[in-house]
Amino acid sequence: MKRLIAVLLILLSCSTFSMAKEAEPVMGDPVLQARVMKLAGELRCLVCQGESLAESHSDFAADMLRKIRALVEQGKTDQEIKDYLVARYGDFILYRPPFSGITLVVWLFPILLLTAGASLLIFNLKRRRARVKVAPLSEEEQTRVKNLLNEGDSKA
Amino acid sequence: MMRFLVPLVVFVVLVGFFWKGLELNPSDVPSPLIDKPAPAFSLQELENPAAKIGPADLRGKVWLLNVWASWCVSCREEHPVLLRYSKTGEVPIYGLNYKDVRKDATKWLQQFGNPYVVSGFDVDGQVGIDYGVYGVPETYVIDKQGIIRHKHIGPITDQVLRDEIVPIVRKLQG
């Protein structure tokens, strides 16, 4: 059981790696810029897909950054800005998909799979343990064991 | 029996997913604008800055909105297809000239031919953002009520036109 827990912990720690962000030239108000870059880090560049808007150097990402900056300057909240982009580009632009609709599958399937796997494992282990019965030795066998052990002693 | 059946079922399901995945194009991001009203805009016409064009002017007919630019290489690829289709007169094609220079765009149309009834001049790409444009060329099919019914991302080939665009246009025209 201890070993199982250790393996699970190692697996979990692997999935929480941190993401490096690329530095962009600072423009204007640093507080505002920090907010723009934080938002951009949570949004996908649809052209490069593997990168966030903050990391990408594509024209699309540059346009989006400009748009996000304009929206931030208009005093929009982070949620309003995300909603604005989702309405135009869809949920796919969010790196963290919303907890609703079809994306529920994305969130729940791994948990489901893990639970199913764990219960199968536990079920099998229990069944195996039940099958192995502790059978005490009969008197006859006891004497045989004793004799065998004594034999070994006398030879040595 | 179960020992072989379970892995077999898992294998078949995985193959099913991978098979489907082979057909999918990862750059085709489904648009949330399908079955939603085409975002309103009023843009200067590319070749006549005094006049304005927008979806409101096109109510009551099925039309195509093709996003293009003179700097876009794939647009050159789809251009002959659009030109040929526009000559059939089946459906009016309107252009959205995306983040372009007016002089370059007009020259491009003179050089390669103009399939568009009119092109809107979206110099800062704002209308493009409203339409969720992320890769030019893109083409939208908009119905008589001004609802977006289809979006094609990437150049229109003869095959795309025949299998995708034309059937939808005909269906919408009724």
Image (cartoon, rainbow, N blue to C red):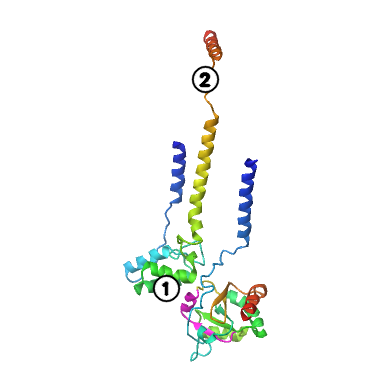
Q: Is residue B78 left or right of residue A111?
A: right
Residue under pointer 2: A136
Q: Do the numbered discs 1 and 2 sit on residues whose CB atoms are within 8 Å?
A: no
Q: Is residue B18 above or below residue B131?
A: above
Q: Is residue B150 left or right of residue A54?
A: right
Q: Which residues are magenta?
A: B116-131
Q: Is residue A56 above or below residue B46?
A: above
Write down the chain letter for disc 2: A
> Residue B161: where, in percent of width, then height?
65, 75
Q: Is residue B76 magenta?
A: no
Residue under pointer 1: A67
- Residue A86 is tagged as none
Q: Is residue B120 magenta?
A: yes
Looking at the rendered structure, the kind of residue marked 1 is Lys
- Seen at 45% across and 72% down, the residue is A63
Write down the chain letter for disc 1: A
Name the element at disc 2.
loop
Q: Is residue A133 above or below residue A101?
A: above
Looking at the rendered structure, the kind of residue marked 2 is Pro
Quadrant (top left, top right, bottom left, bottom right) of the N terminus of chain A: top left
- Whether discs 1 and 2 lie on one chain: the answer is yes
Q: Quadrant of residue A21?
A: bottom left
- Seen at 55% across and 30% down, the residue is A131
- Seen at 63% across and 48% down, the residue is B9
